[in-house]
């Protein structure tokens, strides 16, 4: 008999139950498939469910357990962002352009997940080609925030964040190019991690901006995120940007980290105030910082004038430029959507791209193509790369004196649908605190530090130096423990998930 509250268990608890023979992986799979399909009628976190694959994987896990094997993610259901390839499964990027594309190969991260015993529940919704901060830019409709179905879950990995927040799955994968894991994690009240660039293979991730993209985990807490990252991290010869020597990383956290040994920098320019954020959000974030100080953390205000003033501008030159190049392959010739009634080759190219891509993707392709065009390359793209180098150097100098940097994840909590849809600049500003880490290739994470007056989650961001992912996770665990003592545990789960 399956426990009716199995969805409230952590991933590591489910793995222990399956490894110890207390429950069958097939039973876990059926429970979560039924639950996810029912809840998703209200949330729209999934583009597709992979029931047949999930049950097949579960049967294989059960057989391995009978043979005496122990698997780190035995029978743990997981959702995969729909821009990560799962072999023989649709991978759409939430775009009409790839609506019927079936991945012919397996991504490195999913290959590692299946070997560890994880079960694929389905593919999650996202802003088209991962371009957006609200999951409203999806060809398959918006995902709803489990805390308030009239509000966005953030983006672009909104489906993955909402699936974990509503406990449709204990774990999910997203991708983060400028905050696409951390921002929705903050708005949905879950843990969302962007690892160091190169820490996790990008092989099988459909590219948006190749020098910025990074796959990472969503989980209900730090321990589950740590476990998932330990499975997917590692070098990969099929990804030339993968780190050849992955820094030491383990499945277990340092539970007794002494906060007094941590030097923490509070980024002055990203602090919330009454001019840039609601008063209750400002108050709650400041209370969270104060609670860390009272617990013994040494926190000093630091300044990142280049990174905070120019990161957004630099990002919206480099990312669209790389997107313009990466998305040039969608021409209606080899695969994907094709406009069939065109009168000639040029017409077919133009109509395919005009009708296959949504407005936000077209906007970014146009920006990127302009920045790379003759006469503008030096003025925009080349200069953006130079400033990006200055941003990296600024972080290097700060991390010579500090272990961890902290800031809000976002200057706002979840906003209503349509609130920023017609104002691209307002939407882009949602990522003002998250983009610098991508430009510098740093590991960064969002954890929940409480709720505003509307009971919407507030994200708290931590960053560490490149390659210091273990230090980041240990610090996050310590911070999370402190925040949980201040917040009612029940209120950390939206009502729709209970």
Image (cartoon, rainbow, N blue to C red):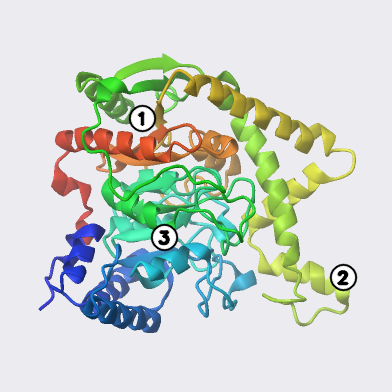
Decide if residue 381 is on the left or right side of residue 139: right
Give the distance between the C-alpha atoms of the residues marked 1 and 3, in whole angstroms. 26 Å
Rendered-image quadrant of the C terminus: bottom left
**Residue underneath mark 1:** 278
Label 3: few (<14), some (14–19) or many (≥20) C-alpha neighbours in 10 Å:
many
**Residue underneath mark 2:** 346
Expressed as whole percent of the image width and height from the top left, the position of residue 66 reads 22, 80
Q: Is residue 452 visible?
A: no
Q: Earlier in the sequence, mark 2 or mark 1?
A: 1
Expressed as whole percent of the image width and height from the top left, the position of residue 315 reads 63, 38
Query: Which type of secondary structure does the marked residue at label 2 adopt?
Result: helix
Query: Which type of secondary structure does the marked residue at label 1 adopt?
Result: loop
Label 1: few (<14), some (14–19) or many (≥20) C-alpha neighbours in 10 Å:
some
For the point 51% across and 39% down, the residue is 431
**Residue underneath mark 3:** 159
For the point 56% across and 70% down, the residue is 92
For the point 45% across and 16% down, the residue is 302
Q: Residue 97 is drawn in which quadrant? A: bottom right
Is there a contact, CB below 8 Å, between mark 2 and mark 1?
no
Query: Is residue 316 depicted above or below 298 in this figure?
Result: below
Q: Earlier in the sequence, mark 2 or mark 3?
A: 3
Give the distance between the C-alpha atoms of the residues marked 2 and 1, in whole angstroms. 50 Å
Label 2: few (<14), some (14–19) or many (≥20) C-alpha neighbours in 10 Å:
few
Query: Is residue 72 depicted above or below 462 in this figure?
Result: below
Query: Is residue 324 depicted above or below 318 in this figure?
Result: below
């Amino acid at each position: 008999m399956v426990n009716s509250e199995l969805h409230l268990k952590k991933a590591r608890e489910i793995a222990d139950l399956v490894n110890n023979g207390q429950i069958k992986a097939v039973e876990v799979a059926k429970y979560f498939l039924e639950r996810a399909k029912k809840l998703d009628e209200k949330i729209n976190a999934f583009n597709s469910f992979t029931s047949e694959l999930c049950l097949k994987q579960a049967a294989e896990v059960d057989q391995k357990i009978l043979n005496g094997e122990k698997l780190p993610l035995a029978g743990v259901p997981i959702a995969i962002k729909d821009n990560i390839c799962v072999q023989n499964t649709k991978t759409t990027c939430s775009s009409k352009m790839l609506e019927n594309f079936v991945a012919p190969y397996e991504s490195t991260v999913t290959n590692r997940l299946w070997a560890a015993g994880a079960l694929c529940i389905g593919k999650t919704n996202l802003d088209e080609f991962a371009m957006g901060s609200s999951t409203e830019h999806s060809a398959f409709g918006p995902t709803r925030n489990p805390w308030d179905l009239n509000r966005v879950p953030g983006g672009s990995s909104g489906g993955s964040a909402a699936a974990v927040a509503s406990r449709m799955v204990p774990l999910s994968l997203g991708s983060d190019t400028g905050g696409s894991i951390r921002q929705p994690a903050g708005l949905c009240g879950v843990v969302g991690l962007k690892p160091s660039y190169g820490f996790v293979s990008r092989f099988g991730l459909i590219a948006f901006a190749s020098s910025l993209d990074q796959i990472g985990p969503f989980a209900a807490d730090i321990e589950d995120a740590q476990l998932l990252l330990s499975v997917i991290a590692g070098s990969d010869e099929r990804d030339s940007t993968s780190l050849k020597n992955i820094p030491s990383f383990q499945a277990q956290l340092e539970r007794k980290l002494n906060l007094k040994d941590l030097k923490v920098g509070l980024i002055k320019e990203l602090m919330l105030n009454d001019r840039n954020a609601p008063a209750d959000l400002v108050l709650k974030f400041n209370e969270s910082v104060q609670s860390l100080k009272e617990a013994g953390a040494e926190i000093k205000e630091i300044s990142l004038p280049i990174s905070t003033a120019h990161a957004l501008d630099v990002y919206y030159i480099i990312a669209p430029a790389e997107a313009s190049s990466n998305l040039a392959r969608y021409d209606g010739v080899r695969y994907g959507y094709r406009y069939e009634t065109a009168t000639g080759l040029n017409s077919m190219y133009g109509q395919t791209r005009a009708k296959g891509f949504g407005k936000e993707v077209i906007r970014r392709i146009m920006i990127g193509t302009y920045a790379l065009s003759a006469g503008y390359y030096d003025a925009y793209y080349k200069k953006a790369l130079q400033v990006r180098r200055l941003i990296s150097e600024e972080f290097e100098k700060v991390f010579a004196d500090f272990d961890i940097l902290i800031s809000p994840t976002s200057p706002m909590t979840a906003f209503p649908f349509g609130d920023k849809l017609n104002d691209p600049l307002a939407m882009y500003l949602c990522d003002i605190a998250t983009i610098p880490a991508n430009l510098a290739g740093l590991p960064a994470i969002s954890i929940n530090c409480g709720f505003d007056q509307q009971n919407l989650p507030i994200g708290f961001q931590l960053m560490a130096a490149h390659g210091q992912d273990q230090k980041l996770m240990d610090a996050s665990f310590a911070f999370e423990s402190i925040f949980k003592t201040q917040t009612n545990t029940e209120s950390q789960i939206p009502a729709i998930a209970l």
